[in-house]
Amino acid sequence: MVEHRQEFERELEAIEAKVIELFAMVAEDLPGATQALLTGNAQVLQMLNEREQLIDALYPEIEELVNREILLQAPVASDLRFLLSVLRIVPELERSHDLVVQIASRANHLLGEDLSPRTRGLVERMGILASDMWRQAVDSWYQRDRSAALALEERDDEMDEFHASLLTELASGRMALPVTMEMTLVARFYERLGDHAVNIARRVVYLAGPATEPPAN
Amino acid sequence: MEQSEQNVAAKTELPKPAAVQDMQRSAFSDTPGTAVFDAKNVSLYYGSFRAVTDVSLSIYEHEITAFIGPSGCGKTTVLRTLNRMNDLIVGARVEGEVHYRGASLYGSGVSPIAVRRRIGMVFQKPNPFPKSIYDNVAYGPRINGERNKGKLNEIVERSLRQAALWDEVKDRLNKSGLSLSGGQAQRLCIARTLAVEPDVVLMDEPCSALDPIATGRIEDLMHEIKSQYTIVIVTHNMQQATRVSDRTAFFSVLRNEESDTRTGVLVEYDRTENIFQNPRDSRTQAYVTGRMG
């Protein structure tokens, strides 16, 4: 049998490359944002803002490409699942990067020393966990690994526990009120980043589809 | 099945749909509807050449079932085994079992004529008889012995309405069937098939010679008549399969390198949305996405 539809295949690969680019920006910038917050390094923020502009351009571009392929190629099966999945996860990626920027922006008006040691410790661990979860989400997408959703749901429970612990610490009133208010938001941002990673891994279950059997004959 | 074969042989009659419906419903309670056809391990030979190998599938009442697959995969051949059209080809031979409403279609004593009266067929190229539009539709009922003019008028009008052609031809029923456009001629052929009130309508690429508007009309009419008939359609147009069918069977070609022969096989049979969204076989995936074939 002859293989064809190579042009369509190339378009799909181009879309995948752009999606991976978006993924990479979130996964790479997340550890940097945590670092900026804890060290008060405001330079990172400038870099992140530039990335944000890139994403704001990339996001509509991907949508337009997907719309076009759906319109012109009448995709079915794995092609349709891929294009619909892209449409659904691209907004999650865009929002997640927003959250990363939000975390980093606290470095501007918050100094590392303003934080209680326990708060610092918890934020650090939430940062590491969120980065891990995002790496896993990226891998699950790239490898079409439908098993990642379960693993990430478990890690998200961990994140929820950190979130609760941090809120308890903040409620103890050991830090200045403005700092406490900011940190409440930061806690929420990490928790949301965990949720988005889980959402993406769940989308991968649909994307991967049923296990394809090799030809029986 | 021996028993039902004897019944059939004794009466030379195929079971009527309504008569067996309740029996079937209990026998197939886990299936979505009554199975009209049950094919088990069907192979079809033209002489010593095996055109189709080992096909097993059930076709359900009031559903539209689509057969898709590349050229030479045997989908038309399988369609034609469902109303014994292959009997007309010298050297054609069917192995395996085809049951129609519980009775063996190839049982001794079953007349191919009786089969085709119950299981009508619409062909790829519209083939109206060189007669008037009226006579085209009245042809079958007349052969069946209907002589009553009023009754025939009624059948002709009903059939043309079902085929969505009535409004276009009601003022020129005496014009030749050959004067119609391609799309109209195909709908006339559908009306002619429906006129004998078949149980099943087999359609062999009914739209491949038609433009998109005429195709749309035929698809609409398939949806409209499916509550009364069971339809099996062979189509090369996968979008058509997704638009009209409830179930899709994907056939492919198996090559034997040693003997340099090809034979058709049924690869996957499932609800249409599964075939086109979550195909389980990589060959189906390659075909429906247009990567192979």
Image (cartoon, rainbow, N blue to C red):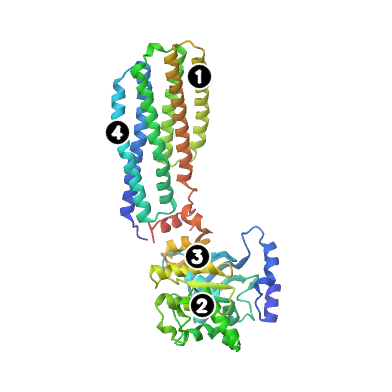
Q: Which class describes the residues within 10 Å of circle 1: few (<14), some (14-19), or many (20+)?
A: some
- Residue A202: x and y in percent read 48, 39
Say the numbered circle drawn on residue A53: 4
Say the numbered circle drawn on residue A167: 1
| Residue at mark 1 to residue at mark 2: CA–CA distance | 74 Å
Residue at figure coordinates x 53%, y 85% from the top left? B139
Q: Nearer the viewer, residue B163 or B208?
A: B163
Which residue is labeled 3 in the image? B66
Circles 1, 2 touching at the beta carbon (< 8 Å): no
Question: In the figure, residue B214 lies in which quadrant?
Answer: bottom left
Three-letter amino acid code at the position of disc 2? Leu
On the question of residue B255 being in view, the answer is: yes
Q: Nearer the viewer, residue A149 or B138?
A: B138
Q: Secondary structure at mark 4?
A: helix
| Residue at mark 3 to residue at mark 2: CA–CA distance | 24 Å
Chain identity of mark 3: B
| Residue at mark 3 to residue at mark 4: CA–CA distance | 49 Å
Sooner in the amino-acid sequence: mark 3 or mark 2 = 3
Sooner in the amino-acid sequence: mark 1 or mark 4 = 4
Which residue is labeled 2 in the image? B160
Residue A107 falls left or right of residue B219: left
Q: Is residue B166 above or below residue A53?
A: below
Q: Which class describes the residues within 10 Å of circle 4: few (<14), some (14-19), or many (20+)?
A: few
- Residue B124: x and y in percent read 44, 74
Three-letter amino acid code at the position of disc 1? Leu
- Which of label 4 and label 2 is nearer to you? 2
| Residue at mark 1 to residue at mark 3: CA–CA distance | 59 Å
- Which of label 1 and label 3 is nearer to you? 1
| Residue at mark 4 to residue at mark 2: CA–CA distance | 63 Å
- Which of label 3 and label 2 is nearer to you? 2
